[in-house]
Structure formats: C-alpha cells, structure tokens
Amino acid sequence: MKRLAKYLYVISLDGLSTLDFEYISNLPNFKELLTSASFCKNVYSVYPTLTYPAHVSIVTGKYPKNHGVINNTLLQVNRSNPDWYWHRKSIKGDTFYDLAIQNGMKVGSLFWPVTAKSKIQYNMPEILANRPWQNQILVSLINGSPIFQYKLNKKFGHLRDGIKQPNLDDFTHQSLLHTIKNKRLDLTLVHYTDLDSIRHEFGFYSEEAKLALKRHDKRIGQIMQALKEKGIYEESTIIILGDHSSIDENKVINLNVVLKQKGYIQVDSKGKILKYTAITKNCDGSAYVYVKNNDPKILNEITEIIKEFNDKYGCIDEIYSREKAEEFGADPNCSLMLEATNSYYFQDEIDGEPIKDISIENTKQSSHYTLSTHGYSPFKKDYTTVFIAVGKGIKKGVVIEKMCLIDEGPTFAKLLGVELKSSDGKILEELLEE
Ligand SMILES: [Zn+2]
C-alpha cells in the first residue's frame, strides 16, 4: 500500500469536546491550522467514554469489547486505587503503531495510554507507581525506553510535579519539542491531559478550562513552529483529536452500599470484602454490574433492587442488559451496565450513604471527587469529541459530518501505508489525498 504521510503526529487533547470547537477556532494557532485542515466536529467516542478504552479504540480501530480494555481500571475489590490497564499486553490484536514498527518505521510516544512494555522505540509510557514500595521514575523507566526517558527527565523533570497540571503537560510538551528537534520519527503519539484534569477539578464551563484550551493553543503553535524550524512542516501530517467530552455533576452513586446491606457483598470486621455474589465496578458516568457466574436468580433480584433504588432517587437513565452492553461495544462479560443521569456519577464505596452530594469543598479536599466527569454513553446529547487533520496526505477543507473514534486507527494506518485488518471502523477515505 502506498504511504501518504511521511511524518505523522497524533496529538490527543484529552477531554476535548465538540462544545469547544467554536472557542478554539478563534484561538490564533488552531485558527491558522484550521484554514488548511479537514475536520469533524461530531466524533462519537466508545462506551464507556473513558480515556483508556478510548485511546485503545483510536489505535486499534476496535470497540472495547474487541480490544479488551473495557475500563480504565481493573476490578480489584479491596484496593482503593486499583491498577489501570497500563500495558500493551492488555490490548488484543494489532495497533496501527505496531504495524508501523513491523514495517521498519520509528515510533515515539509520550504518555499515550496502554503502551507500557510495548515495542515503541522511544516510549515514555503513562504508568503510575501504584504500590508503596515502588518508585515512580523506576517504574516508568522499566516500562518504556530507559535512555530516552532518562534524558528527558534529566532535561525537563524540574517542570513536573507528579500529575499536577499544567506542570505535567509542560513537561510532556517540552519533551515533544525536544524529540521533534533531535529525532526523525515516522510516527509520534502524544497525550496531553491538561484540559481533562482541569475540567474534573473545576467543572466543564469553568474559566480554568478556557485557560487550559488557551495553553493547548499555544502548544499547538509551538509544535508547528518546531516543525517549521526543522524544515519538515510541509512534509508533516498533524492530527489533533479528543477522546471524549465531559459533563458537570454533583452527586455520587455508591450502589455497592446497597448490595452490601442486602447481603450480596460480605465484609470482615475491618471492612475488607471477603466475598460477593454481585458487585458494581464504576466507569464514572456508567457502571458495570458483575453477578457471580451470571446466576439468573441473583441477576433478577439485583435488577429489581436497582429499579427500586432508581424509583427513589431517579439517578439512573438506563439499565442495560449484558447483551445490550455488548451491542454498544462495552464489556461482554458484565451482567448489567448502568447509565447515570446527568449530574450523577458512580463510585464503588461500600460504606456511607448510597447517594453523596459533592460540593466544591469535597473536590478541594480530595481528587477522589470531581465536578465534571465522563464515562457516560457516547450517545448522550452534546457529548461528542473532535478530529482535525492537516498536512501531507490530507485534503484541505473536507468537513465530515459524523464519525466514530474507531475510524481513526484505520485512517492512520492507511496514511502510513499499512492496514489494520480486523478493525471495526472504516478508513476516512474522503479526507485522504489520492
Ligand atoms: Zn480522557
């Protein structure tokens, strides 16, 4: 297959929403980029609309049920901070970046989710030291490319303050500019989380979110500038995409409190879960219910309990069957999937009240609580994300009315002259040059 792109940059602006499009179109660097770009303002994410399932859908072109990353985190009942799906091995089948590597291309990645221990040659994976005895720098080094990361940490590590924003993205960004200057890579993946983190903390429509978008605009301008200075701007292809939108909320649903009260979850005297026959696992705006062995009698009881609960609180929009969840592309092994009503989201606490009001005070005290979140059905109103493509191999001025996140991977593969054979999505032929 003919290769259309020479230097492909895939830039993920986590949490970028359709509702941001007008605002960013009037920021100087986005504006300049958009004059020669093709784009789609209505990109449907995948269910659950979470960062890890979405980023894996982008690189595989598959629904979560087919790529295997069905949530951000694993079901680990007694861990207050469960592990995330950090490793490439969690992904079933091909990614477009692996196909590029197999075809002799050089790939770099900065904080792209679910790439730990992948074959990416220049990789700084997104992975957290999640055990008390682990050291963050060491965990990152052994799960990515040690020398590449060591050099970037040495040069720009002072910019970083854990996962605090905008510090983290400032680090990511300087690392990207440095990589553009010093390496010649066929494909570069980069994941910025500034906007998403800020929205979780301050809310969707906050002034802080607008400032995060302005910072992104400045970063985009500096990326364009770095490519121009290297003399490869005309030969580069730039993709700017979001993974999901988000919705303001102020109440948490803890259904496990009810399941414990009714005897489906059993705990010891210290509150540790000993066993369960039914449990919920949150995806923020939605939640999976897992019934042991999908026992039909228990499943019926649980469904009735949830309906009764919802009659009282009106906090759940939909109770989806396992079959329906699978049809939407979510975990085919769940027993039910619950979709929260706007202004509610799910957590997995087993103690306290089943509904908790969130105030700004809660979110200030703990990042455990947020003012805006995602994970809801991709078909909720005004909840789509954005796709912008510009440069070599891309036509100018094509506007795609609607598309899905799973169409991106096959399109990137085609740009690089490879083919994602088993994807669920379609190549966006209309924006590719002959
Ligand atoms: Zn995200």
Image: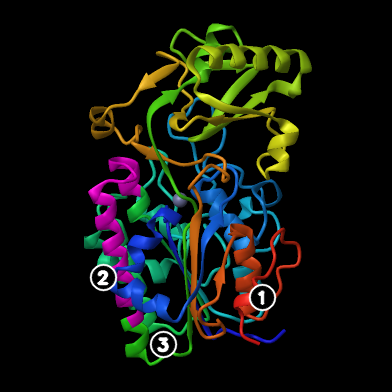
Q: Compute the Cα span from label 3 to label 2.
A: 25 Å
Residue 56 visible in the snapshot: yes
**Secondary element at tag 2:** helix
The answer to whether 131 is drawn above or below residue 21 in the figure is above
The answer to whether marks 1 and 2 mark residues whose Cβ atoms lie closer than 8 Å is no
What is the CA distance from the residue labelled 1 to the residue labelled 2? Answer: 41 Å
| Disc with the residue nearer the chain's start (1 vs 3) | 3
Structural distance between the alpha carbons of marks 1 and 3? 23 Å
Which residue is located at x 31 percent, y 41 percent?
203
If the image is split into quadrants, where does the N terminus sit? bottom right
Report whether the residue tagged 2 is closer than 8 Å to ligand 1: no
Q: Which residue bears the numbered disc 3?
A: 233
Q: Residue at x 64, y 19 (%)?
A: 278
Give the residue displayed 35% in from the left and 74% down from the top.
Answer: 31
Picture quadrant where residue 277 is located: top right
**What residue does disc 1 label?**
429
Identify which amino acid the numbered label 2 is placed on: Lys
Which residue, given by chain and number where applicable, does mark 2 sit on?
Answer: 155
Q: Which residues are magenta?
A: 197-224
Q: Is residue 152 visible?
A: no
**The quarter of the displayed image where residue 131 is located:** top left
Q: Nearer the viewer, residue 297 or 214?
A: 214
* Crowdedness near tag 2: few (<14), some (14–19) or many (≥20) residues, C-alpha within 10 Å: some
Given the image, on which type of amino acid does mark 3 rest?
A: Tyr
Residue 409 placement (x, y as % from top left): 62, 66
